[in-house]
Amino acid sequence: MRFRRSLVAAVLIVAGCSSHGAPSGVHGSATAAPPPGRSAAATDRDFDGIRLPVFASPPPAEPVTAPSGALAPMYRRLAVHQRVAFLTMDDGQVQLPTAGSLMAAAHVPFTMFLIGPVAAKNPPFFERLVGEGGVIEDHTLTHPSMRGLPYATQRYQICGARDLLRTTFHSTPRFFRPPYGNYDENTLRAVHDCGLQAAFNWTETVNNGKVYYQTPVHRIEPGDIILMHFRPAFVSDVTAALTAIHRSGLTPALLENYVN
Ligand SMILES: [Zn+2]
């Protein structure tokens, strides 16, 4: 897989795209003909008999600027002017051995909001996903519903997970997602005070291979944030999310590149 991956990266560079893992998260084009000698375009996006969408390269990111102040901003979508959407994955308890290979085949950037101690119990699983385009962010220590909890408790949950994830993965989270999407002003104050930049909820959810739209258009719109989880249906959830993004004429982009 590693060897094949480096070949793919080399081919993408030759084709004028940046390699996988570059900050802009640029990937192969759906319409470009494969370079000479490369008929692997289809197999690159096949996983265990599933045909994964192939995406056009996202443009260089035009990030939104998070407002400054004592409270971190909360976004459920980003007001972008580019045809991109953001794939996010929460919690981390169900760690399918095939998740790394799937994300390698999918070749898209994604953001993981992880419960600190859950992630810290199996670093290799999540490190592999980081190697396949994932970024690890903060989703508390014990996954409480934060709304209504005292400020000190919320701060402990957010700063504690930040510290544990930083120690475990040698990278400091920038973003936070409140469990169940439940938050209040103390949450946003604690996010800010823990040195994180922004909090995120979502516009679509994915479960058991089905996308649930929260607007009547039944389409993923530019700037939408899609929520899925590390669950037994991980493969069909990733496939459903990517298929929906592709059908909407969008390209997955990395959330971290879109907030300054
Ligand atoms: Zn969660």
Image (tube, helix red, strand yellow):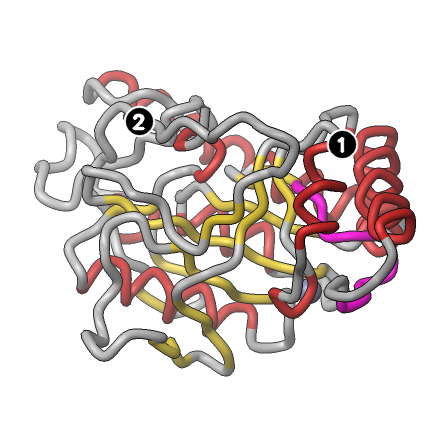
Q: Quadrant of ligand 1?
A: bottom right
Q: Residue at x 19, y 74 (%)?
A: 217
Quadrant location of the C terminus in the rendered image: top left
The one of 164 and 124 positioned closer to us in this rendering: 164
Give the amino acid at mark 1: Asp
Q: Is residue 221 left or right of residue 207?
A: left
Q: Which residues are magenta?
A: 137-145
Q: Is residue 198 above or below residue 13?
A: below
Q: Residue at x 36, y 40 (%)?
A: 253
**Is disc 1's CB within 8 Å of ligand 1?**
no
Classify mark 2: helix, strand or loop.
loop
Residue 125 in magenta stretch? no
Classify mark 1: helix, strand or loop.
helix
Res 96 seen here: no
Circle 2 sits on which residue?
61
The one of 164 and 182 positioned closer to us in this rendering: 182
Circle 1 sits on which residue?
193
**Is disc 2's CB within 8 Å of ligand 1?**
no
The one of 113 and 38 positioned closer to us in this rendering: 113
Of the residues under marks 1 and 2, which one precedes in the sequence? 2
- Please state the horizontal and vertical placement of residue 259, each as a whole percent of the image: 44, 31
- Please state the horizontal and vertical placement of residue 49, each as a whole percent of the image: 38, 70
Q: Residue at x 87, y 61 (%)?
A: 142
Q: Residues within 10 Å of mark 1 (few under 14, many from 20)?
A: some
